[in-house]
Amino acid sequence: MKVNPYTQLLKRINQYSTIRNLRLHIYINVPVDQRCYNNSSADQVAAIWVEGNDDANIPHDRDIVAHGRDVRGKNDKMVSCRDYNCYRLQIRGSNTSITTEKHQSEIRSELYQGVVDSVTNGESCRSEVGQRVVLPASFIGGPRDMRRRYLDAIAFVHKFGKPDLFNTMTCNPDWKEIRENLFEGQLAHDRLDLVSRVFRAKLLDLKDRILKKSISGHVAAYDYVTEYQKRGLPHFHMLIIPQSNYKINFLERFDSYVVDELPDKDVFPRLFGLVSQHMMHGTYGTLNLKFPCMINGKCKNHYPRPFLEHHVQRSDGYPMYRRRNDGRSVEVRNFTLNSQWVVLYNPYLLYR
C-alpha cells in the first residue's frame, strides 16, 4: 500500500459519483498489447496486479470483477440474515412454524463443557470458572456502549448548550394497531413482538415529526433512550436542544409547547377525554396514602400542584407552569380531580 502508487487510486474508486454504473473486468489469458504499458494520462485509470497463489507462481484461472454493491438491481430476491430471521420469528398463521436446530443437544453440551471441566477439576471460585469475555463497544447495552453514549450526550451539551425540551412516549396496549392484530383470546402482553413493532413504528413517526417536520422548531441536537416498564411495555425519553432561534428564552413561549390544565370539555371534548384518561396523576396525595409515590404523608412528585395565574421561573432554573383555578374537574376512580393533578402535556402529541 505504501509502495505501489496505483493502490492509492484504487482506494478512491468509491468516491466517483458514477460508481454504480462502473464495472471493472480484468480478463485472464488475453493477448499482450504493448500499448497497455504506456504511461497513464488521467487519474481515472488504475491497475491491479495479480500474483500467483502458489510457489510455482501459477496465475489464477478466474477473472477479477469489481462492481458496485447494488449492481444486482432492485429485483434481487436475496435478503440479509437479519431480515430473514425477523421474518421467521414473526407470528403469522396457525400453520406457520419456526424451524429449530436438529442437533441442539450437542450444541448445548459444547456450550457447557468448559464449566463441567472446571467443576471436575475441583474449581470452587466462580472467577476461576469459564473464560472472560470483553464485549465490544458495538454491543448495545454493554458497559463500553453505555460509556460511549454518555460521553456523546455530554459532548452535545458542551457544544449546543442545555436541552430545553423533554419528550416522553409510553406504549399503550389499547392502541388500535395492537388490538386489531391480536388473535382471539389474546391480550397485549401475549404478543410482545407485536407491541414492540407497533411502538417502534410510532416512535419513528414521532422522530420524523420532531426532527424533519420541526413541529417544535429546528433541532440542533437530540438524544433519547428506550426503556421497558415492569409490565413489559416500552417507553422512551428524548432530550431536545433546539437551535438558537427556537430556544425557550421567554415565559410566553411555554404556551406554544406545553399545557398544564384541564381543557374545556365543551370546546375540546376529545382532548378532554385524552387528558382525563392519560394525563391525570391519579388518586395520590392526601386522597390515598397507600400509593407508592407517598413518602411520609407527601407525594414525592409534589402533587397536587399549586394554582398559578402565570408561568413562573424558579431560581434553580425549573419553571412552574400556569394552573388556573377555573373550576374544571374530572372524575377519576371515584375521585374528583382538578387542574392541580394534571401532568404536563402537549396537545398535538397527545392527539397522535
Image (tube, rainbow, N blue to C red):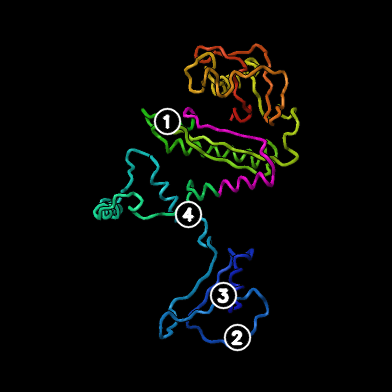
Which residue is drawn at the image coordinates 53% and 69% (left, top)?
66
Residue matched to label 4: 136
From what the image shows, is residue 242 above or below residue 309? Answer: below
Kind of residue at disc 3: Met
Residue 35 shows in this picture: yes
Q: Are discs 1 and 2 less than 8 Å apart at CB?
A: no
- Mark 4 to mark 1: distance in Å? 34 Å
**Which tag, 4 or 3, sits closer to the chain's start?**
3
Q: Nearer the viewer, mark 4 or mark 1?
A: 4
Q: Which mark is residue 37?
A: 2
> Would residue 313 be found to the left or right of residue 80 on screen?
right
- Mark 2 to mark 4: distance in Å? 47 Å
From what the image shows, is residue 351 above or below residue 162? Answer: above
Quarter of the view holding residue 95: top left
- Mark 4 to mark 3: distance in Å? 28 Å
Q: Is residue 166 in the magenta section?
A: yes
Residue 147: x and y, percent? 54, 48
- Mark 3 to mark 2: distance in Å? 21 Å
Residue range of the region highlighted in magenta in the rendering: 148-175
Kind of residue at disc 2: Tyr
Residue matched to label 3: 1
From what the image shows, is residue 133 above or below residue 193? Answer: below
Residue 104: x and y, percent? 28, 51
Which residue is drawn at the image coordinates 45% and 35% (left, top)?
195
Residue 148: x and y, percent? 55, 50
- Mark 1 to mark 3: distance in Å? 57 Å
**Which tag, 4 or 1, sits closer to the chain's start?**
4
> Would residue 90 be found to the left or right of residue 41 on screen?
left
- Mark 1 to mark 2: distance in Å? 71 Å
**Which tag, 1 or 2, sits closer to the chain's start?**
2
Residue matched to label 1: 188
Q: Quadrant of the C terminus?
A: top right
